[in-house]
Amino acid sequence: MPSVLPVPVPVLVAAASSMLGGTAMVATRMLMGVSDATTVALLRCAGAAAALGIYLFVFRRVRIPPRELAALAALGFLMFGVFNLLFSAGFAYVPAARGAVVMSTMPIIALMIAAAIGRERITRAKIAGGLLALAGVVVALGERAAAGAEAWRGDVLMTLAALAGAMHAVLSGFVLSKRAALPVLAVQVCAGAAMLAGILAWRGELHHVVAFEGTQWLAVVWLTFVAGLFSYLMWFWALEHAPVSSVTITVTLNPISAAVFGAMFLGEPLTLQLTVGLAAVVAGIVLAGRR
């Protein structure tokens, strides 16, 4: 019996992961006043690194050949190190809404990279879906994307983050066609956490990781385990089972989710623009990811 779902289950899982990513934006904004970009980036992948590393490499005793291990670690540095640093640092120059608009170019960048190396075919539906979702983000966030004179610095950081995320998704999709998602994620997130911890240790700032109090610790727990570990597991599973372009287009839900949760927890307004933008984003995801 054919499925009544408009898009495959892996795309829906990726969408759920991206919505959790939106909550990570809210948690990040709650912590940036008392912490720095590197610390927040480390917190997001530390829980996943500890849980997956202990489970797979201590209890399950998974073994990966050295050459493959090095390649996976390099991808981990790219995503969980470089991407997280650029993503968090961008918020120092632009509001979350503007950063989210720039990050929403990631699906189109990923499609271009995948097509260039022969991993995917560029189709009108994929391009139209990506542009429609991007337009939805612009409409939803509207004037909140306005920023000051140094906004170009944040734009550059967020664009580089989008490029890093797109490259990681494409290359990880290739790896996941040969190896299961769990060990791939485990190696990558451990490598990223090690890189970030090394940077903090070199700067003598590891003590900042515990410099929180009250509700900030709730944000840390959410960022580490829900918007970190759980979200990563869903994202990698989706990359294992669906085309990269169909998965990455769901990142356009990220800022919509951030706006909704920002209204719930930070008192930010919900508008008609947000509703219209959300409808356009969902339509774009369905168009690009349909069966």
Image: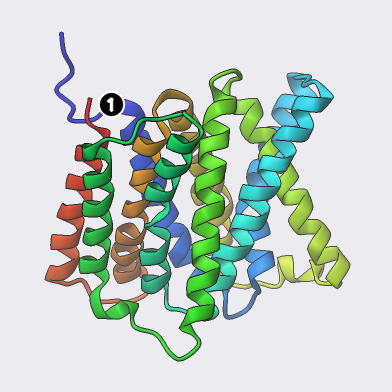
- Image x and y of residue 81, in percent: 68, 54
Is 204 left, or right, of 236 in this rendering? right
- Image x and y of residue 263, in percent: 29, 70
- For residue 105, above or below residue 215: above
Is 44 left, or right, of 278 in this rendering? right
Among the 4 quarters of the image, the one containing residue 41: bottom right
Secondary structure of residue under mark 1: loop
- Image x and y of residue 152, in percent: 48, 80
Among the 4 quarters of the image, the one containing residue 134: bottom left
- Image x and y of residue 111, in percent: 40, 41
Q: Residue at x 16, y 13 (%)?
A: 2
Count up the numbered dots. 1
- For residue 34, above or below residue 132: below
Q: Residue at x 57, y 80 (%)?
A: 33
The image's colour scheme reads: rainbow
In the picture, the quarter occupied by the N terminus is top left
- Does residue 43 appear in this view? no
Q: Residue furthest top?
A: 1
- For residue 222, above or below residue 58: below
Q: Residue at x 53, y 50 (%)?
A: 165
Q: Residue at x 52, y 54 (%)?
A: 163
In the picture, the quarter occupied by the C terminus is top left
- For residue 63, above or below residue 42: above
Local crowd size for mark 1, using a 10 Å CA cut-off: few (<14), some (14–19), many (≥20)? some
Choose between 6 and 225: the one closer to the eye.
6
- Does residue 94 appear in this view? yes
Q: Amino acid at mark 1?
A: Pro
Choose between 227 and 248: the one closer to the eye.
248
Choose between 269 and 177: the one closer to the eye.
177
Is 135 left, or right, of 111 in this rendering? left
The residue to which callout 1 is attached is 8
